[in-house]
Structures are given as C-alpha cells and as structure tokens.
Image: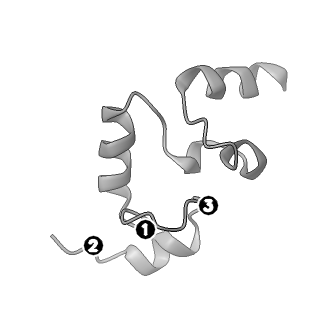
Amino acid sequence: MECKNKQTNTAGCNCSYEPCARKGICCECIRYHLSMKELPACCFPDEAEKTYDRSFEHFIRIHKKG
C-alpha cells in the first residue's frame, strides 16, 4: 500500500530515529508501536521523544507533571 500523505506526514513527524522505515506512514508506525506496547513519537514532546522511551508509563509521567 502506498501512503498518499507520506510527504505531509513526514514534515510534521518528530521521530528522531533516522533509519525508521515507517517515518511518514502513520498507520504502519502506530501499528508497530502499539504491537511493542509503546506509543509513537508524535505522542511525545521533542525532548521526551529523544530519549526513545516510548512506553505508556513515560507518557503518563510526562503528562502528570504539567
């Protein structure tokens, strides 16, 4: 399946993992991360995303602070 929005999605993607084959293909990215019991980069602020801790627990810790 070809993603018709890949260019637009990639422009707004904050994923800092450069060799990512799913960058800009949101449906694949979400499916992959949920299967790993994680959330995708776009759910995290840039500084938190750079830690590569995409766990639900990390998401909750970040959002409890604010």
3D distance between C-alphas at marks 2 and 1 = 8 Å
Q: Secondary structure at mark 3?
A: loop
3D distance between C-alphas at marks 3 and 1 = 12 Å
Residues at marks 3 and 1 touching, judged by CB atoms closer than 8 Å: no
Q: Is residue 43 left or right of residue 65?
A: left
Which residue carries the number 3 mark? 16
Crowdedness near tag 1: few (<14), some (14–19) or many (≥20) residues, C-alpha within 10 Å: many
Q: Could you tell me how many numbered marks the image carries?
A: 3
Q: Is residue 65 left or right of residue 58?
A: right
3D distance between C-alphas at marks 3 and 2 = 20 Å
Ranked by sequence position, the earlier of labels 2 and 1 is 2
Residue drawn at x 72%, y 21% as measured from the top left: 61
Which residue carries the number 2 mark? 3
Ranked by sequence position, the earlier of labels 3 and 1 is 3
Residues at marks 2 and 1 touching, judged by CB atoms closer than 8 Å: yes
Q: Quadrant of the N terminus?
A: bottom left
When the figure is inspected, residue 11 is found, relative to residue 42, above or below; the finding is below
Q: Secondary structure at mark 1?
A: loop
The image shows residue 3 at horizontal and vertical percentages of 27, 72
Crowdedness near tag 2: few (<14), some (14–19) or many (≥20) residues, C-alpha within 10 Å: few
Ranked by sequence position, the earlier of labels 3 and 2 is 2
Q: Is label 3 or label 1 in front?
A: 3
Which residue carries the number 1 mark? 24
User: Which mark is drawn over residue 35?
Assistant: none
Q: Label 1 amino acid?
A: Gly
Find residue 20 and report its image quarter: bottom left
User: In this orientation, which residue lies closer to the viewer: 25 or 37?
Assistant: 37
User: In this orientation, which residue lies closer to the viewer: 61 or 53?
Assistant: 53
When the figure is inspected, residue 34 is found, relative to residue 40, above or below; the finding is above
